[in-house]
Image: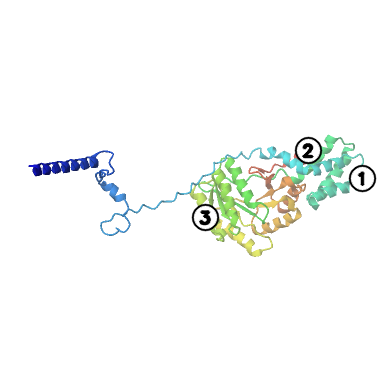
Amino acid sequence: MDGYLGVIVIVALVALLAAGGLFLLLRPGGKTAPPPVKPPETVPLPEEKEKRPAPAGEEGEGATTTVPPPVKPAEPVVVKPELEVPPPSAGRMVRLRSRLARSQSSLGRGLLDLLSRDRLDDEVWDEIEELLLTADVGVAPTQAIVEELRTRVKVLGSRTPEEVRALLREQLLVQINPGLDRTLNVARHGERAAVVLVVGVNGTGKTTTTGKLARVLVGDGKKVVLGAADTFRAAAADQLQTWGDRVGAEVVRGPEGADPASVAFDATAKGIEAKADVVIVDTAGRLHTKTGLMDELGKVKRVIEKRATVDEVLLVLDATTGQNGMRQAQVFAEVVNITGIALTKLDGTAKGGIVISVQRELGVPVKLAGLGEGPDDLAPFDPEVFVDAILGD
């Protein structure tokens, strides 16, 4: 009986120990944590799966690799310059008169001072003659002016400053000849544009004058096409393009070294096609000593005349070159039929007498005067404004 009870007690103790150990294992503060709950697997959507790159080492069949499209470079933004509205040609020289007066005042003041002397002897007349020659009036015109002044002074006798000024003004105007037709021939011929050919030696400001002339004509309400036939100077076409863009004038150009006559022909054709009023062709600045280049200038004119007539041939001269400019003018006149002269830098020289001498030698009028560096400093030449600026108010 005692043995039986002992067995029961031992079984009961084992059961209690087992229950206690289980309790220690399951209580919250126990050392053994329950295993983590694995979250449900997320299945990617089809479009997401297509965008996900294949894991490393799993490329091949069944792997999805998306290559992004190449990024297209942004096209450069071309900003067109705002079109400018140049002032009309009327009254331009009057507005620029002060610049002319500053450069020519020494000539006018010197002549007035000499003629106002109480006694005009041979020595004074020699000074007057020298002053006129220094101003590039030329030998023959100078002699004519001095001779006429001597005769008129003898008739007048005593002279007031007003009489001296009127006398000198009259003689200068006679030599400049206000009766010459200084109109630019830029009128359309029915359906055909007028053509202006601009010629001259290197360094006279020919391309700049071409661009400024375009502004003059656009200011007068005309549609202009420019021909960049100076294909020997790399920057000439770009320079003319800038002038044209500013006023909305189309520019016809060719590759560097192209045949100038071909470019001139294309510009003329474009002017007719675009129903322009005027085509202005800028030619290369040719040295008058190079006969071959001068012959080429004649070719340019002949090729243009296959489509149209050349209505105006403007010779651009630098007023500061004096008598050297005269020699250049004479050579150009032998090659092409010059119809007018554009004198540049007239505001920067006291040698305004070149207006008289160049007209006398060539028999063609000065039609345009460059009186500054600004874009609108080219003006139709006005003889009376010119003489008044020389003599002052």
Element type at mark 3: helix
Q: Which residue is mark 2?
A: 392
Residue 35, position as x, y percentages in the image:
25, 45
Q: Is residue 314 visible?
A: no
Type of residue at label 1?
Answer: Asp
Residue 338, position as x, y percentages in the image:
65, 53
Type of residue at label 2?
Answer: Gly
Q: Which residue is mark 1?
A: 121
Foreground pick, 181 / 387: 387
Mark-to-mark CA distance, 3 and 2: 47 Å
Residue 258, position as x, y percentages in the image:
55, 60
Q: Which residue is mark 3?
A: 266
Q: Measured along the vertical axis of the image, is residue 118 above or below residue 335?
A: above
Mark-to-mark CA distance, 3 and 1: 63 Å
The numbered mark, 3 or 2, whose residue comes first in the sequence reads: 3
Mark toward the viewer: 3 or 1: 3
Q: Measured along the vertical axis of the image, is residue 115 above or below residue 315?
A: above
Q: Residue at x 76, y 44 (%)?
A: 103
